[in-house]
Amino acid sequence: MIRNAIGSLLGLIGAAAALWSPFRAWYDDRHGRDFRLTDLFSGSGIDTTATSGLLSSILLAFLLAALITLAAVVLRSRTLMALAGVVVIGVTVLWMVRQGQAVGSLSVGGDGTGLGVGVANAFGGGALLILAAAVMRGRGRRTTRTPAPYEPLDLPPVTPTSPAWPPVPPHDGRP
């Protein structure tokens, strides 16, 4: 039970970090909400100058992962928790690949150029979700107990000559 509680808490923190990441800088001070989700799967790659609506951005994938996380917490499902982590890390890695193709290379810079804090939040959130799946115990398996078949005891029969004979009279409570 404690493992499920700790895993659920880690999962919720990871989902919150993933949901927060599109509102942070991802690349060259450009927020993650500015990148369209469909650009990750198009043949033309990421448009580095276009902006996106909030629910058509990368936030949509992370919102889906957060909903999967909530379902995993309610159902105590390790599989769903791991799936949410794979979605977050998968979208982030796919974005990095497509961004690298669009710009030519990826860099990390301390002056606001290159990869930003949003990418780190997304990776950290995805890692926490996978860690939560590893920590959780999951649901216990229900087992049905079948009663043992009735087996008569092998006791010797009571006869008038046995030591249990005569039966003891009931006690009426007087000394």
Image (spheres, rainbow, N blue to C red):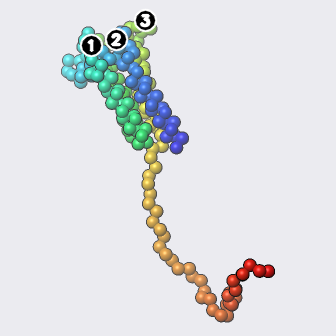
> In the displayed image of the protein, which residue is found farthest to the left?
43
> Which residue position holds label 1?
51
Dot 1 or dot 2, earlier in sequence: 2
Would you say 122 lies left or right of 5 here? left
> Which residue position holds label 2?
30
Residue at image position (35%, 26%) is 62
Residue at image position (24%, 20%) is 39
Count up the numbered dots.
3
Dot 3 or dot 1, earlier in sequence: 1
Residue type of the residue flagged with mark 1 = Thr
Front-most of residues 64 and 107: 64
Residue 101: quarter of image: top left
Circles 3, 2 touching at the beta carbon (< 8 Å): no
Residue type of the residue flagged with mark 2 = Arg
> Which residue position holds label 3?
111
Choose mark 3 or mark 2, whichever is in front.
2
Would you say 12 lies left or right of 28 here? right
Would you say 118 lies left or right of 148 here? left
Label 1 neighbour load within 10 Å: few <14, some 14-19, many 20+: some
Residue 13: x and y, percent?
46, 28
Residue 158: x and y, percent?
62, 89
Choose mark 3 or mark 1, whichever is in front.
1
Above/below status of 143 relative to 14? below
Name the secondary structure under disc 2: strand
Residues at marks 1 and 2, CA–CA distance in whole angstroms: 10 Å
Residue 96: x and y, percent?
33, 19
Residues at marks 3 and 2, CA–CA distance in whole angstroms: 13 Å
Residue 129: x and y, percent?
43, 32
Would you say 48 lies left or right of 172 here? left
Residue type of the residue flagged with mark 3 = Asp
Name the secondary structure under disc 3: loop
